[in-house]
Every structure is written in structure tokens, then in C-alpha cells.
Image (cartoon, rainbow, N blue to C red):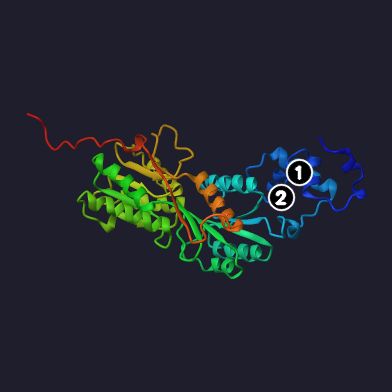
Amino acid sequence: MPRETLSAHPEKRGPATVRDVAAYAGVSTATVSRVLNGVVTVEPTLVDRVLAACAALHYQPNPAARTLRGGRSVMVGLLVPNIRNSFFMEVVSGVEAVLRHGGYLPILCNYLDKPQGPLQFIKFIEHLVAVPLAGAIVIPRHDQDPALTLFREHRIPVVAIDHRTVDESDSVLIDNVGAAREAVAHLIANGYRRIGLICGPDKLTTGHGRAQGYRAALEEAGIARDPALERRGKFDEHTGEVHAAELLDLHPPVEALFTTNMSLTLGALRVLHKRGLRIPEDVALVGFDEIPSVLPGYPSITTVVQPAFEMGATAARRLIQRLEGDGPHTRQEIILAHQLRIGQSSHARAPVVTGTAV
């Protein structure tokens, strides 16, 4: 319950603090920090209570005052391309859990992978380096993003997630080559040979590595690579739709699709649904990342599952090591384990009947 002494006599105190807001709202200081920094996982009722407490106490956030003992900032920038994506939501949850436990405050910046995305990304970084920022955890737009040099120029340590950057930043990711090779090898073992690839751009670790793994699996199985079966573009649903349609229109069409992220998988599923194609009887499908939901009546989807929460948590732990001088001082590339979760969408292909028994 709100503290009466604070609500009735705010003028008898100095400027309200986060601790005051937390006491008034009946929540922890960590919850207040999460609300003020826009973390989307806070329950709406708690958000309302914190905001009401801020208004009642005339609380004014003071970023410069948010420091650890010794005058060090506790604010950590967190740049994510699309918070609506369930993979990124899990990453953010992992980051936030570890930072909160370590006494750090995340500042969530949700930039969009749209035409205005690059400018938005740069603007966010410019704003972040202007405050007393301890460090940053970033899912960058691509592996050689020049905007990241702003952090380096301000001596702000950075940990990248899902990408291997070319600068001194630490990184947390999975073995994208190995994961894609395993996924495609699974399709080949189940009798599929004409396998279409729908992948992201080569300038991303994720896109480059997953395309490499696709080709490696074909080579290991003695299947000649056919560039006509490979499609590249943005990691979004529209790209998945367009390229799935193109691959299905080939003569002969593909026997299976390998889609290399959740959005591409959802786009491909939409095309298969529109065309009335059965999975896997007409076309098999293997995706990447957790699929939040599938169309009614569709089989479970075989997919490469990344440990999204643990990726975020690991990145936060590595950044705290950097900030507190605890752990390796050299650049670290941390590879976490993935899992190929077998569903019904890639069941063994039925044998092709070439003639009629006599």
C-alpha cells in the first residue's frame, strides 16, 4: 500500500528518489527501474502503480544520479531490432534478469528493421553515448555496422548477440553453420533432395553462416548445389512469402523448404496455406527459432531452437565481467548450444512410385 507520509507530505523531503517511488507504489526498486526504462515484461497493473506514484511524488528521473559506489554508471544500453519478435523478447528477458540481479539498469531501444531503421539505430546510439552509460548489449543491424564505432570512441564496452562483429566487441551466438548443416542433413536423411533455401543477407553472421551450413550438408550428401534453389533477402515475413512462392513455382518445384528464421518461416507457411499444400506430403519444412503459433490443422514444425533467454543472460554476464574487471580481458566469442526440435513437418518422404506392379 502507498505510504501515507510520502503522499501527504512530499514537500518535507528532498526530491523524490526511485526508492521513494517504490515505497509509495508498494513495489521493488527494480520494478520501478524496469517501468521507467520501458521494459515490456512488467505487468500493466504494476506499470500503472509506478506511474501513479511518480506523478504523486513529482518524481523526475535523473540519469546522472544513477551510479554505483565509486561514481560508476549502472545504465546499460540494450538495442534490439524488433521487440515484437518472440526470439528478441526472450533475449531481452534474459538480459534484464541478469542486469537486475547485478544492480544494473537496462535502457531498452527498440529500433525497426525498416527503411528508417539505420537512422533510428544511429540516433539511439548517439543518445546513449550522451548519458553516463556503463556498457551496451546490441543485436546489430549487420556485422560491420559503423554506428558501433561510436561506443568504441566513448570507451563503452559492447557485447553483441546473434552476430560476430568485426571490432573488439564480445559476442554471444550459436554455431550457425553447424545448426543449418544439421537441419538440412535431417531433411536429406528423410529422403528430400531438392531443398530450397530461404535465408537472410550475407552481411549478417546469421545469414552467412546458415547458408554455409545448407551448402555443407548438400556437399556431404553428394548433392550438387543448385543456385536456383537459394533465395536471400531480409529476415522478414514478406521475404519468406515471396521466396517461398518463387521456389514452389520452379519446374520441378522444391521438395522441401529450409527457412532460416521465425519470420521467414511464418511467411513461407502463409504461402503454403494459400496454395492448399500439405506439410510434409507436398512440401516438407524445417525452420529456425521457436514458432509461436501455426495455422489451425497444420503439423508441428521441425525447427532449430536457439537458447534465446540464455543468450541474453550470457551477454549480460559477460558485460558485467567487463565492467567489474572480473573474467577474461580479451575479446570473447561465446558459442551456446542449439537444438534441432523434430516435428511432423519433416517426416520421411513417401517413396516415389515409378510404375505399376504386374
What percent of the width, then of the height, locates residue 29? 73, 44
What residue sits 63% from the left and 56% below the top? 76
Give the labeled residue for mark 2.
36
Few, some or many residues within 10 Å of mark 2 (<14, 14–19, 20+): some
* 188 is higher (above) or lower (below) than 208: above
Q: Quadrant of residue 43?
A: top right
Few, some or many residues within 10 Å of mark 1 (<14, 14–19, 20+): many
Check the picture and name the quadrant holding the N terminus: top right
Q: Is 9 on the left-hand or right-hand side of 87?
A: right
Which of 11/344 is in front? 11
Q: Are marks 2 and 1 in contact (CB under 8 Å)?
A: yes
What percent of the width, then of the height, locates residue 107? 65, 54
Whole-angstrom CA distance, mark 2 to mark 1, is: 9 Å
* Circle 2: residue type: Leu
**Disc 1, SS:** helix
What residue sits 43% from the left and 49% below the top? 261
* Circle 1: residue type: Val
Q: Is 297 on the left-hand or right-hand side of 247?
A: right
Q: Is 189 on the left-hand or right-hand side of 240?
A: left
What percent of the width, then of the height, locates residue 347? 30, 35
The disc placed on residue 50 is: 1
Task: Work out which residue is located at the far left of the displayed protein and give it.
Answer: 358
Q: Quadrant of residue 215?
A: bottom left
Whichever of callouts 2 and 1 sits on the residue coming sooner in the sequence is: 2
What residue sits 23% from the left and 53% below the top? 219
Task: Work out which residue is located at the far bottom of the displayed protein and give it.
Answer: 153
* 201 is higher (above) or lower (below) than 217: below
**Disc 2, SS:** helix
Which of 345/328 is in front? 328
